[in-house]
Image (cartoon, rainbow, N blue to C red):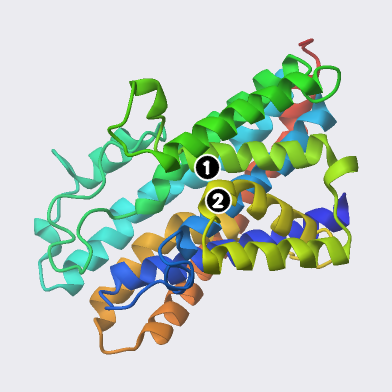
Amino acid sequence: MSNRKNAFDLLRVLLAIGVLFNHAIVIGGYRLIDPLALLSKNQSNLGEFCVMGFFTLSGFLITASFERTHNLLLFASHRLLRIVPGFLVSLLVTGFIISPLIFMITGRALAAFAFTGPESAASFFFRNMFFGIRQWSIRDVLNYSAYKESLDGSLWSLLPEIQCYVFTLIAGMLGLFDKNKVLLLITAIVTFIFFAINFNFSKTFGPTILILSPALKLYTAYLAGMLLHVFKDSFTLDKRGTVYALFFTLLLIKFGGYNIISPLLIALVLVNAFQLFEYKVKYDISYGIYIYGFPVQHLVHVLFGQRVNYLCFVGISVLAAAGLGLLSFIAVEKPFIKFRRYTDPLMASFKN
């Protein structure tokens, strides 16, 4: 599993950078079309593909994590220690450092910045600290930005991620990963049917049960990754099979039909492709890149405007977000990961 994990760490970093390529078009104010949207005739875009890739990979790896622990409290503590500290610190950094910088760079006095009060930096932290994003920006910080809707639009996907962790926990406790695999398969089939309905009918069609969460693509992608792990003996592809799957995916992207089975295709291609080689990543900066990329790109925009071309904008954004991601991993995420050495014995002492 260690070789797989190393390759998957690299995949996470690449997916996080792919999200920045997509977001740069809107945040930087460039009149460009996302390359995957252009190639697929708007069936998808690079940002959506990468976020679905994240969820697919999470479904695969988090299921494996549960199978290693088989302990409710141990599993829950691992997930919380991995995702919560970095998220909370990112809210503070975005609200109290990046936002005031944006505010001052656009010619306004720091004294006028909304540190407290309604729609302030403080409320940005407290209203969003439980992952359900209820405040998207800080008062008038983004008045001079090309994209004014959100300071950190990427954060919305973290709540569905946690919901998927809860589902993993429930599924594991019910034995869906071993003795009740058939029930997991039935659950997956039903979910994929709803997914297909969601893409074949308009949003106002039929009873409300047909109109599921806007995160349905992400849930389905996570479930596809989960299935790949549970049925890994049946779904693991060799090099030739992975190439065939990739070629089939490209055909559907080009000529249509990709969207309706995209979670399965993404899972098959990405998970199998990155199991074929070993690559060490010393610092897992993917999470940091993802949670800091959006506000960093706002900052890059007010610093450079459109005086730099799109690729230069992306390059600066990637370097800055990677720097923050590295700091986040070293100063926040890794210490809490190491803290497991103290919590694990306590959690393991409780029976499920």
Task: Quadrant for residue 101, please give it.
Answer: bottom left
Q: Nearer the N terminus, badge 1 or badge 2?
A: 2
Q: Relative to residue 289, is residue 242 drawn left or right?
A: right
Q: Which residue is labeled 1 in the image? A: 218
Disc sitting over residue 331 in the figure: none
Q: Which residue is labeled 2 in the image? A: 52
Q: Nearer the viewer, residue 104 or 314?
A: 314
Task: Quadrant for residue 79, please give it.
Answer: top right
Q: Can see residue 82? A: no
Residue at figure coordinates x 83%, y 58% from the top left: 275
Residue at figure coordinates x 36%, y 74% from the top left: 33
Q: Relative to residue 181, is residue 127 drawn left or right?
A: left
Q: Secondary structure at mark 2?
A: helix
Q: Residues within 10 Å of mark 1 (few under 14, many from 20)?
A: many
Tag 2: amino acid: Met
Task: Quadrant for residue 295, please give it.
Answer: bottom left
Residue at figure coordinates x 52%, y 42% from the top left: 218
Which quadrant: the C terminus? Answer: top right
Q: Report x, y in % for residue 191.
A: 57, 30
Q: Relative to residue 343, is residue 18 drawn left or right?
A: left
In the image, residue 251 above or below residue 224: below
CA distance separating discs 1 and 2: 6 Å
Q: Secondary structure at mark 1?
A: helix
Is the C-beta separation of discs 1 and 2 under 8 Å?
A: yes
Q: Report x, y in % for residue 131.
A: 41, 35
Q: Nearer the viewer, residue 105 or 252?
A: 252
Q: Relative to residue 37, is residue 25 drawn left or right?
A: left
Tag 1: amino acid: Leu
In the image, residue 272 above or below residue 301: above
Q: Report x, y in % for residue 310.
A: 37, 83
Q: Report x, y in % for residue 122.
A: 25, 41
